[in-house]
């Protein structure tokens, strides 16, 4: 692994967090897979030797539970979803070089080899721990067969994770008040021998690793709590039948924890690709054994696994550490948390069944905010982005310029590219390269959109339709420039919209498949002298269509709400709490006895914002008009902080904003949101780290 700018002379691999073979794909899933696909295609455009690999995560308790409910084996259940994913991803132009699964022979073999190495190097030991046991079913319970209370925050927890509270990884035996998922009865804890990985011995290595790591800031900052604090060893076995058997004869029917074999699929899938194309084309060992460029694109809920456990395991087993981990934000639907149980989701199949081109969704997911920011999906916002940027900017320029060229010249006019246009294309190429090296998926798309915007301004300024008779030579020059710009846009936009880029490439007389493999140099190569009449690349989404789609979504959510009971549990404590000094605090308002559910809290869209401007509202004693960047847009917010803060010093300050509060009018000025502050002195809530505007507070 190097830290040189891409492209490097070392092969790269781009991976995305494995889809869990347990249900349909939705736009929340697709954001990561599309993002990683864009990054891999963009690296290829730079001339980087790279591969995009992934696979289905086939193991774990939820699959075993759901398979039992359907009366099939876990393997049959998971394989069905694996085959569905294999069919679905290509329909969104997600172009894996290899897509495997964690239960295939390659991954089973690679996983056992790595675990044996960890044992041989002294990183694995045995320890008796308390494991959930269901006396009625007479069986030990793997993590997700146990539900109860998180010992750290008191929220509902399932086995290995406090997934409704603090999000901490939990070891077997930590969940309090355990309940067996098998029978619904109280479980008990019994001693059981399990295998542990000595992560604690690698703390110094991990501290250096996290300082070297590239990618998004959330992936670098979030794990520091564990890496710089008390780093505990990691239980790597579970009591269940479904999974990869622990290697050796003394495993006593234990299988490996799913977070051991799941990331190893990255290596296994790379192996399979290398075996298929041959090591002369792509050598997996150069990547994983000889310091290649390993880049992971993941959801932020699995940062800890990819920045603590996974690099520790790789280092101890003699494999290449990741160069970068880029973590995406979450997807919300109409400003509310995506909920599959409530059917508040836009499903992958649903999107395609509505007849939309996959590249429209790819563009929305890839360019609507930074990679680590949360993205809200609504049909209104989708239509707005499609109509304004794809139709109004990119499509408008591509169609009007190539149509004019074909009708007036039969293709590309016989003229040289002007210095102005050549320089602007070179600037776009540089912007593209900078975005890739910043792991900015949005930046990759923006380089093409900005070039199209320049093209629209250029053709409008030069008005070639008024020059064909009076100054035909100048007209040829202008249209030659425009056709070159169109070709450059096809090259730069291919990672974002590969299907549409291929269609445009075919207009210029090329093989539509070539645009996938050409490098950025092709943006300045002469277009075809002759080409066919083009068609409009993008179609506007009309208001009536948006209303129809909103109606369908609302009906689904309402139907699911009537069928689904809220299973969120609340707990109350009669014990007094103190401030850590031993004295019960009495000078603060008491905590209200009325509780809200976690789902109700999730309804709040709380974001990090940055104040761009601040000015007092004339005639108001307390009110200030703020312009606040919340990542996806800029809001005007009115706040009563005039007497408590130096208004002139507020710009640049990060704040926390409730973004989905109803609009209000204060002193005749509209306020679109509310900032959060503590106490009578309006102490503005802010962030300790470098969270970016638009990131959700959870």
Image (spheres, rainbow, N blue to C red):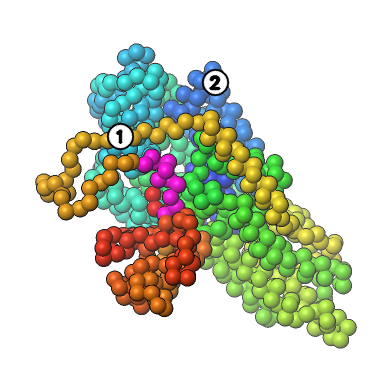
Q: Residues within 10 Å of mark 2 (few under 14, many from 20)?
A: few
> Is the residue 34 above or below the residue 424 in the image?
above
* Residue identifier under label 1: 571
* Residue identifier under label 2: 70
The answer to whether residue 44 shows anywhere in this view is: no
> Is the residue 314 above or below the residue 563 in the image?
below
Q: What element carries label 1?
A: loop
Residue 402, x across and y down, in percent: 79, 67
**Residue at x 57%, y 55% (from the top left corner):** 366
> Is the residue 142 above or below the residue 642 in the image?
above
**Residue at x 82%, y 70% (from the top left corner):** 405
Q: Quadrant of the N terminus?
A: bottom left
**Is 609 in front, or is 312?**
609
**Residue at x 68%, y 66% (from the top left corner):** 393
Real-space Cα separation, disc 1 to disc 2, in angstroms: 33 Å
Which region of the structure is painted magenta?
596-606
Q: What element carries label 2?
A: helix
Residue 698, x across and y down, in percent: 39, 49
First in residue order: circle 1 vs circle 2: 2
Res. 650 image quadrant = bottom left
Q: Is residue 347 magenta?
A: no
**Is 224 in front, or is 413?**
224
The answer to whether residue 166 shows anywhere in this view is: yes
Residue 586, x across and y down, in percent: 15, 50
């Amino acid at each position: 692994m190097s830290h040189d700018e891409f492209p490097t002379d070392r092969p790269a691999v781009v991976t995305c967090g494995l889809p869990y073979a347990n249900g349909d794909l939705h736009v929340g899933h697709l954001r990561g897979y599309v993002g990683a696909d864009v990054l891999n295609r963009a690296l290829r455009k730079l001339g980087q030797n790279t591969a995009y690999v992934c696979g289905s995560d086939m193991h774990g308790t939820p699959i075993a539970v759901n398979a039992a409910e359907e009366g099939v084996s876990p393997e049959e259940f998971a394989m069905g979803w694996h085959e569905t994913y294999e069919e679905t991803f290509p329909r969104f132009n997600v172009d894996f070089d290899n897509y495997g699964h964690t239960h295939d022979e390659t991954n089973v073999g690679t996983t056992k080899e790595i675990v044996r190495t960890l044992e041989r190097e002294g990183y694995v030991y045995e320890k008796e721990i308390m494991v959930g046991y269901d006396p009625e079913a007479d069986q030990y319970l793997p993590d997700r067969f146990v539900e109860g209370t998180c010992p750290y925050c008191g929220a509902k927890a399932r086995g290995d994770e406090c997934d409704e509270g603090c999000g901490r990884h939990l070891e077997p035996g930590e969940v309090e008040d355990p309940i067996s998922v098998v029978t619904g009865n109280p479980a008990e804890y019994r001693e059981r021998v399990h295998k542990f990985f000595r992560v604690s011995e690698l703390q110094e290595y991990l501290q250096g690793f996290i300082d070297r790591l590239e990618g998004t800031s959330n992936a670098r900052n979030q794990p520091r709590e564990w890496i710089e604090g008390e780093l505990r060893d990691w239980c790597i076995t579970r009591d269940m039948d479904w999974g990869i058997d622990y290697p050796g004869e003394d495993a006593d029917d234990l299988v490996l924890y799913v977070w051991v074999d799941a990331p190893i699929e990255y290596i296994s899938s790379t192996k399979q690709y290398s075996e298929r194309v041959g090591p002369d084309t792509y050598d997996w060992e150069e990547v994983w054994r000889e310091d290649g460029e390993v880049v992971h694109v993941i959801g932020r809920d699995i940062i800890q696994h990819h920045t603590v456990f996974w690099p520790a395991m790789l280092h101890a087993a003699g494999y290449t550490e990741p160069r970068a981990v880029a973590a995406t934000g979450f997807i919300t639907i109409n400003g509310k948390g995506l909920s599959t149980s409530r059917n508040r989701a836009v499903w992958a199949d649903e999107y395609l069944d509505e007849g939309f081109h996959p590249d429209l969704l790819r563009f929305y997911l890839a360019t609507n905010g930074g990679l680590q920011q949360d993205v809200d999906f609504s049909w209104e916002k989708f239509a707005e982005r499609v109509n304004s940027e794809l139709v109004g900017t990119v499509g408008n320029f591509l169609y009007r310029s190539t149509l004019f060229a074909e009708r007036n010249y039969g293709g590309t006019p016989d003229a040289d590219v002007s210095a102005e246009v050549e320089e602007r294309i070179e600037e776009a190429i540089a912007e593209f390269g900078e975005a890739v090296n910043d792991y900015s998926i949005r930046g990759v798309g923006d380089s093409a959109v900005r070039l199209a915007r320049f093209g629209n301004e250029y053709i409008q300024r030069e008005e070639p339709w008024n020059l064909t008779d009076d100054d035909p030579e100048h007209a040829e020059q202008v249209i030659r420039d425009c056709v070159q710009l169109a070709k450059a846009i096809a090259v730069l936009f291919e990672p974002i919209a590969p299907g549409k880029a291929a269609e445009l490439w075919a207009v210029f007389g090329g093989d539509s498949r070539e645009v996938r493999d050409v490098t950025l140099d092709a943006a300045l190569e002469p277009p075809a002298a002759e080409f066919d009449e083009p068609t409009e690349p993008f179609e506007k989404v009309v208001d009536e269509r948006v209303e129809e789609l909103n109606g369908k979504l609302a009906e689904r959510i309402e139907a699911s709400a009537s069928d689904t009971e809220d299973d969120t549990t609340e707990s109350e404590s009669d014990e007094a709490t103190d401030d850590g000094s031993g004295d019960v605090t009495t000078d603060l308002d008491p905590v209200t006895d009325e509780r809200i559910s976690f789902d109700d809290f999730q309804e709040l869209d709380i974001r990090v914002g940055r104040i761009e401007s601040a000015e007092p509202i004339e005639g108001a004693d307390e009110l200030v008009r703020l312009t606040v960047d919340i990542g996806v847009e800029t809001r005007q917010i009115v706040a009563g902080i005039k007497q408590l803060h130096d208004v002139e010093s507020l710009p640049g300050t990060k704040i926390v904003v409730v973004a989905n509060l109803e609009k209000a009018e204060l002193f005749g000025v509209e306020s679109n949101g509310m900032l959060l502050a503590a106490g009578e002195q309006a102490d503005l809530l802010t962030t300790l780290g470098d969270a970016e505007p638009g990131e959700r507070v959870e």
